Image (cartoon, rainbow, N blue to C red):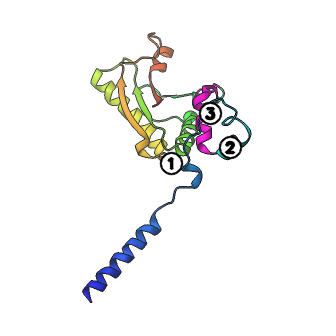
Amino acid sequence: MKRSLRAAIALSLAALLAACSTPTPLEEKGAPIESRGDSAGAGGAGAASAGIGDRSVRQLDVANDPSKDPLNDPNNPLSRRSIFFDFDSFVVKDEFRPILEAHARFLVSNPTRKVVLQGNTDDRGSREYNIALGQKRADAVRRAMVALGVAENQMEAVSFGEERPKNAGTDESALAENRRVDIAYQ
């Protein structure tokens, strides 16, 4: 009796776990198709059997032609990778929401891509204070991206404090360029 009860529980648990798993769609299982430039692989039948439009073909196109990469297209919001902050603040301003939304959409649709959110400050304040403020800025951007659906394991938040200025000037416009988080794709 105990043995059949244990077997029934084990089968129920296995069925429950199998029902909870999410199968991988067929179009995500294919390997990238390599074009070798010969007539057998490039064109008609080879392209049709490759499943034009599936993820692996699009990734191959980007690898062969970097101009098709949305991250390098100057007309795409993904080419903008800096979120700027007010003096002594780590509040993400509404004007940068479209940039965050574009990067979040890209990361959600490309779950293997990862970014480093690099917090930066101007040179006012102590080194320790600026490291802490840069980290708060990077964490604020990370939280905003998580709220937009990006998986936490796709992002790493780090602080460089005042160590990596974008502009070496000393006027307010130069200092404002240094108060930022840079989104760096790996």
Can you give x and y, in whole percent of width and height, for residue 86 in the image? 47, 27
Q: CA distance from mark 2 to mark 1?
A: 28 Å
Asked where in the image residue 139 lies, by quadrant, the reply is top left
Name the residue nearer the viewer: 28 or 173. Answer: 28
Can you give x and y, in whole percent of width and height, for residue 141 in the image? 45, 37
Q: Residues within 10 Å of mark 2 (few under 14, many from 20)?
A: few
Q: Residues within 10 Å of mark 1 (few under 14, many from 20)?
A: some
Q: Which residue is mark 3?
A: 35
Asked where in the image residue 155 lies, by quadrant, the reply is top left
**Residue type marked 2:** Ile
Q: Is residue 62 magenta?
A: yes
- Residue 140 to residue 65: above or below: below
User: Can residue 52 be seen by looking at this rendering?
Assistant: yes
Of label 1 and label 3, which has the lower sequence position?
3
Foreground mark, 3 or 2, reads 3
Residues shaded magenta: 51-74
Which disc is residue 149 wearing?
1
Q: Which residue is mark 2?
A: 52
Name the residue nearer the viewer: 96 or 142. Answer: 142
Q: Secondary structure at mark 1?
A: loop
Q: Residues within 10 Å of mark 3 (few under 14, many from 20)?
A: some
Q: Which residue is rendered at x = 35% and y = 24% of the image? A: 161
